[in-house]
Amino acid sequence: MPGKVRVAFMQLSSCWGCHQSLLNAHLGLLSILPKLEIVYWPAVVDFKHESLVNRPDGDIVVGFIEGVARTKEDTANVKLMRRKCKIIVALGACACYGSVKGLANLFDKEELVKRKFMEAESITNEDPKEPTEHVPGFEDHIINVKDLIDVDVFIPGCPPRTENIVAAISYLFTLLAPGPENLDKNKTVCDSCDLYKKGCFLDNNQLCYGGITAGGCELMCPNKGEICYGCFKATSKPGPKAKQLKEILDNTLKLTPEVGANLQRFLDIYLGVSNITNFYFRGDLLQRLAYEPESFSTKEINGKMVLDVKPTGNQLLDEIIGRALHLLKDDPSFKFSTKTVCSHCDRDVADKVPIDLKRDYEGLPTMDKCFLEQGYICLGPVTQAGCGAICPNKANAPCLGCYGAPVGVKDQGAKFISALGSLCADKDPEEIMKVIKDPAGLFNRFTLADSTIKHKYHDVTE
Ligand code: SF4
Ligand code: SF4
Ligand code: SF4
């Protein structure tokens, strides 16, 4: 890697747990720290806020943000980080979804201030009032970091497991690395391909990506009868075969399962390592197609629809990638496998149907059987994998959902309510609601600020 990677860490309103989880890597940090130039990390290094403000925009490569925008200072710091950093990482459930603090969106700011500063049982001051001096003032409600600025990477968890943070940082290093020593961006794989002149895969209408892939590869899959999927990444001088590839894609109207699998494998390899379950990297367009297909805009080029993306900065290459993504979008052959906490849970599962629902303090669950089947609410089925199912496996505690919703689920709480409704179809809803005292806090404990409800409570009038 050329030089050190300049990084900054920002803490908004939060508990510091996510940063602590990173520090918990202990000796594991030895492989990371020498590669970092830390320029701002208020809780660990004594850099002043002014030093961050005075840096040129875009000067920092990666900025990690922990916490939620509760105060006006938080909001200003979120925007400051976006200006100063090329890549923004939302570190932890608060920065990703609002986390437990997002539940405050169920109340007005005035109610919260009254409760916190005037009514709390711990207050001993005889004339308690809201502090107004030397404090930044509160936002009306918590707005997710991703709704304030563009976020590039999401590392969920409350806190994210140390291994997940280290893996995400190591992955980002691989993206910033210059590539193999013999990589030659002025050439393509086709330049060394034995098939070039005697009829290649493309001439038989088979998709091969050598014409858009940088040269220098010694393995040369096409010379062994295999398609080039582009692991040497984008060339800066696409060859004539690039245009031939684009023509084939332009003339493809419907995908067969084989072509769909081919396109997906190409994008996987060419754009980076997607399908990593413990974090979401928006720059990985295939992952983004699975998580947020609606976030892409579509454009028409010469009568062909493409997704408007610019991963390489080369117009022809970007159009080929945009066309491939457009063909995969909404196609049944596009499969982005995602796992939930249940898939890493060691407990015995029959059908997950609860016998009698219980509050979590009632009785003592056994260590071997699915929590739901024992009657305890467990959000494992609607929670993205990545933590290793640590609560059900190690703590004899149901999953509370801190890794957020898996791919394709927009609202973790709504999805669980729907699942519970199906599992308890033979039960009286009134009886179920007697056990569920706080639906939002139970089902959207970590994701309310990112749910369908968001902060709409404030929109409701009598
Ligand atoms: S597109 Fe593939 S098969 Fe055709 S010349 Fe290039 S590398 Fe060889
Ligand atoms: S205990 Fe929870 S995480 Fe484990 S299988 Fe049951 S529902 Fe899933
Ligand atoms: S089991 Fe659930 S609550 Fe526990 S760490 Fe994993 S995702 Fe979070």
Image (tube, rainbow, N blue to C red):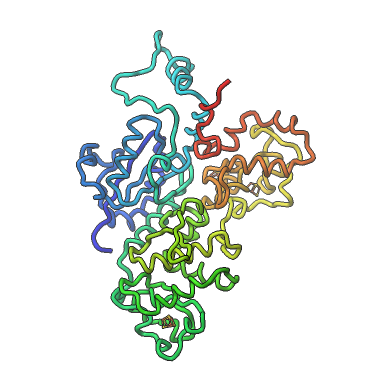
Q: How many marks?
A: 0
Residue at the spot x=56%, y=63% of the render?
A: 334
Residue for point 61% across, 43% down = 379
State which quadrant residue 333 falls in: bottom right
Q: Quadrant of residue 410?
A: top right
Can I make out residue 181 in this image?
Answer: no
Residues 40 and 447: in front is 447
Viewer-nearest residue: 101 or 124: 101
Figure quadrant, ligand 1: bottom left
Q: Nearer the viewer, residue 357 or 426?
A: 426
Residue beneath the point at 28% across and 75% down = 186
Percent across and percent down for residue 53 are: 23, 39
What percent of the width, then of the height, locates residue 272? 42, 64
**In the rendered image, the vertical position of residue 452 relative to residue 186, given as above or below:** above
Q: Position of residue 232 (x, y in %)?
A: 37, 73
Can you give x and y, in whole percent of width and height, for residue 26 in the image? 37, 50
Residue 267 vertical position relative to residue 346 in the rendered view, above or below:
below
332 to the left or right of 250: right
- Most extreme residue toward the front is 303
Q: Say which quadrant the C terminus sits in.
A: top right
